Amino acid sequence: MTGPIAIIGYAARLPGGDSLDDLDGFLADGRSAVRTHSREELLEQGIDPAEIDRPDYVPRSAATGWTVDGAKHIDMLSTRERRVTDPQQLLFLDCSVAALEHAGIPPQQVSGQDVACVGGVGMGLYAGNDLSSWFTQHLRHDRKLLDEAVPPEILVGNGSDHTVGRVAYRLGLTGPAVNVQTACSTALVSVEYACMLLNAGRVGLALAGAASLYFPGKRGYRHERGGILSPDGVCRAFDASADGTVGGSGGGVFVLKRLTDALRDGDEVHGVVEGIHQGSDGSARASYTAPAYDGQLRVVRGALRAAGVQPDAISYVEAHGTGTPVGDLIELSVLDEVFAGRPAPLPVGSVKPALGHLDAAAGVASLVNVLLGLRRGAMPGTVNFTRAPDALAGGVARPSAEPVPLRPTGPDGVVRVGVSSFGASGTSVHAVVSDRAVTVRRTGAPASGTVRATPVASAPAPAAAPEERPGTTAGPTTADPGTIRRQVLELVLDRIASDRPTPEESGRLGAVDLGLDSVDLLAVAKVIAARWAVEYDVIDMLMFASIDEMTDDIAARATGEGSS
């Protein structure tokens, strides 16, 4: 990295608050969003009673309040696309649009621009012994949906490869769209990659972040002796009694720009990435998923070099801090070595006891915590912390349960905070983030030169999905022309997002005019074959001048009156 990068906007949907201001108050109050789910709640989520009643089942986690139905920025998606798409992808898209708006950039303004999008989604790390995903927990049990679907829409909707591609497609971004998957360090690695693209001059603006949800939304986990999950569902990062971490869900996206460009354009700056460095732990660790002392040491020192500062310039470190005894011990030991010789102790904390460990989006929670802390002028204390392990009690790195005021440690008057994110994949990353050029957002008083976002017109509420009835696709149904027309139009309109035409208007339009692509047509043809035993391929459907013409053909062929 060759120059500082400004964070000019961001959006996050995390446990503890539906807005940044709500989250700020929640963290400042020292509360934890990790909660116990009742047996009734777990049963309502569809969890097997036998699983809930196991003696090793811990019914605790932290969940975001975000839902697909409540998302504010995915109106460009059709009802059908929302149903078949992994909500993690939808959360990432929702946060991307919201982050642009927070940056004062109308989303339509980036269409056709070389804007980068970098990010990834979760891997279901806290699901227990099974692989938990939207597909395994929901779609594969929806027989009607699968019967009416074709492989491409299911694969695209549920493959993590398509997360950032979906954003680039929907927003019209023509810069690099790169999916990142490095387990728990995914979010901060995405930020690092975006910084590289900006400093290379490849793009002038970048979106970076991650999203991680577990399915169902309220669930616990099985505790296994020697595993990373806490036996009582309480994360005690850096505490002498730390015995594991607890899962959380959420996500967020950051809008990044070269600092020189941001100052030139009068952008509001929420934080500055002074330096950031990532690397692989290699083979110098006890096992593939074990934390590595040397790997962490390299990235922390690398970030300080990239920022051009000495260890005593850091006011605070937002650590990875998972609450696992070995992980915490190694992380504090690394910080003790890097920051040895400081004239004052190094305050250290972790947001995970408050919001849970967000898997691929863990770095989102950490970086948001830092940005809110820079705005507030203090970092919150680490929830559930009482005292450090005896072996580390005398080190320079000092965790604290009390809020930590952020004060400059050098003559330039800049507050600099370190942020760590370490992946079970062995990819580690550390960033130095400062309040240089930061302007505090005040209600009704935007920073000088800030461009306010143009509100995005709300699309009509999506039509409710048709009621699922057994046998809907089991065989041919009535060939009554009126019924055929109505049902075909339902299939078509389900695949159109905002500005949907009326059924009358739709009937007079062709497939291309309605914006249906080949995947849409394949899926519609599959349902037509199941309901009326009429076979079409994509070319056949494109040849019809209108949907009405196609429904007339279906009725004629279904009754044996048309051509075969």
Image: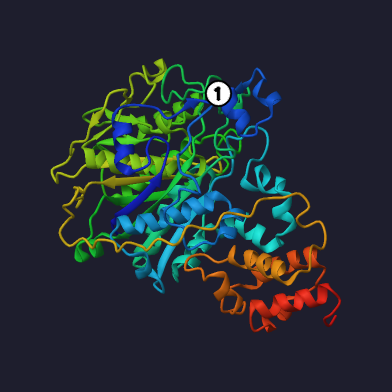
Q: Residue 228 in the image: x percent, y percent? A: 56, 28
In this rendering, the answer to whether 453 lies above or below 245 is: below
Q: Residue 208 in the image: x percent, y percent? A: 42, 55
In this rendering, the answer to whether 254 lies above or below 241 is: below
How is the rendered protein coloured? rainbow
- At horizontal 68% and vertical 36% (from top left) the residue drawn is 130
Relative to 267, 168 lies left or right: right
- At horizontal 80% and vertical 72% (from top left) the residue drawn is 534
Residue under numbered circle 1: 38
Q: 42 or 414: nearer the eye?
A: 42
Q: Is residue 189 visible?
A: yes
Q: Residue 216 in the image: x percent, y percent? A: 59, 38
Image quadrant containing the N terminus: bottom left
Q: 19 or 510: nearer the eye?
A: 510
In this rendering, the answer to whether 552 lies above or below 524 is: below
Q: How many marks?
A: 1
Q: Residue 47 in the image: x percent, y percent? A: 65, 31
Relative to 496, 556 lies left or right: right
Amino acid type at circle 1 is Ser
- At horizontal 74% and vertical 64% (from top left) the residue drawn is 527
The quadrant in which residue 383 appears is: top left
Q: Is residue 1 visible?
A: no
Label 1 sits on a secondary structure element that is loop
- At horizontal 56% and vertical 79% (from top left) the residue drawn is 513
Relative to 368, 416 lies left or right: left
The quadrant in which residue 391 appears is: top left
Q: Mark 1, residues whose alpha carbon is within 10 Å: few (<14), some, or many (≥20)? A: some
In this rendering, the answer to whether 220 lies above or below 1 is: above
Q: 257 or 340: nearer the eye?
A: 257
Image quadrant containing the C terminus: bottom right
Relative to 381, 48 lies left or right: right
